[in-house]
Amino acid sequence: DGGITQSPKYLFRKEGQNVTLSCEQNLNHDAMYWYRQDPGQGLRLIYYSQIVNDFQKGDIAEGYSVSREKKESFPLTVTSAQKNPTAFYLCASSNGPSGRRYEQYFGPGTRLTVT
Amino acid sequence: GENVEQHPSTLSVQEGDSAVIKCTYSDSASNYFPWYKQELGKGPQLIIDIRSNVGEKKDQRIAVTLNKTAKHFSLHITETQPEDSAVYFCAASSNDYKLSFGAGTTVTVRA
């Protein structure tokens, strides 16, 4: 059953703590993405990676970090430097073997609450 | 960068009627326009997309139209059903990787 998995579905942290969100895909996609979604707003791009061992900042990268050591995995760390970390975080992937680079497919999301 | 505006923010329609959502974009270089449907607590699902060399695309009850001159594109849902109730997002891209999203439209289909 191919797809994108994100874990956990809900995550609670205390202010000042770093937290890492997991994203795994078995679609053989080259590119992976992290978005943040806040109520009443569209999705905003945090980081993206076109290929293993390479990633670029998106529009709101401050306070976040990523790694891409494996094709299947693209974890996101929300650091204590992120001013408003409470949000719904979505991972996506694209650019499968068919070369359809534009089509992004999303995971189920992780809702992070920081108090 | 690209700026995508989406209207309306909420839309209530009677079951069986049509729903139309409109988006405008600012970057004339944008050439890919997907639409996503998001149900409560879930990730967005790609429902239809259109590229700049096509003016209209249809898939069963949903269709998308693109006017490159005016820089706007629209989603049309015909014969709406209760399961069409969700949040719909438009997006635009001028390269292979970065999508800019609209703020979303909450569609409610009344039985």
Image (cartoon, coloured by chain):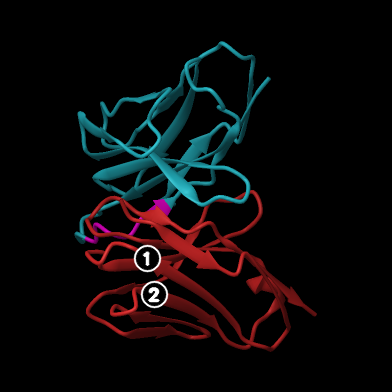
Chain colours: A cyan, B red
Quarter-of-image position of residue B84:
bottom right
**Residue at horizontal 46 percent and vertical 77 percent from the top:** B74
Along the line of sight, the residue nearer the viewer: A92 or B75: B75
Percent coordinates x, y for residue A4 in the rendering: 43, 45
**Residue at horizontal 41 percent and vertical 28 percent from the top:** A76
Q: Is residue A48 above or below residue B73?
A: above
**Amino acid residing under circle 1:** Tyr
Residue at the right extreme, as displayed: B111
Quarter-of-image position of residue A52:
top left
Subunit of mark 2?
B
**Residue at horizontal 26 percent and vertical 30 percent from the top:** A70
SS assignment at label 1 = strand
Percent coordinates x, y for residue A107 in the rendering: 48, 46
Along the line of sight, the residue nearer the viewer: B90 or A99: B90
Disc 2 crowd rating (10 Å Cα; few below 14, some 14-19, many 20+) is some
User: From which residue to which does the magenta span run?
Assistant: A100-105
Label 1 vs 2, first from the N-terminus: 1
- According to the picture, the residue beneath numbered tag 2 turns out to be B72
Q: Is residue A83 above or below residue A31?
A: above
- According to the picture, the residue beneath numbered tag 1 turns out to be B25
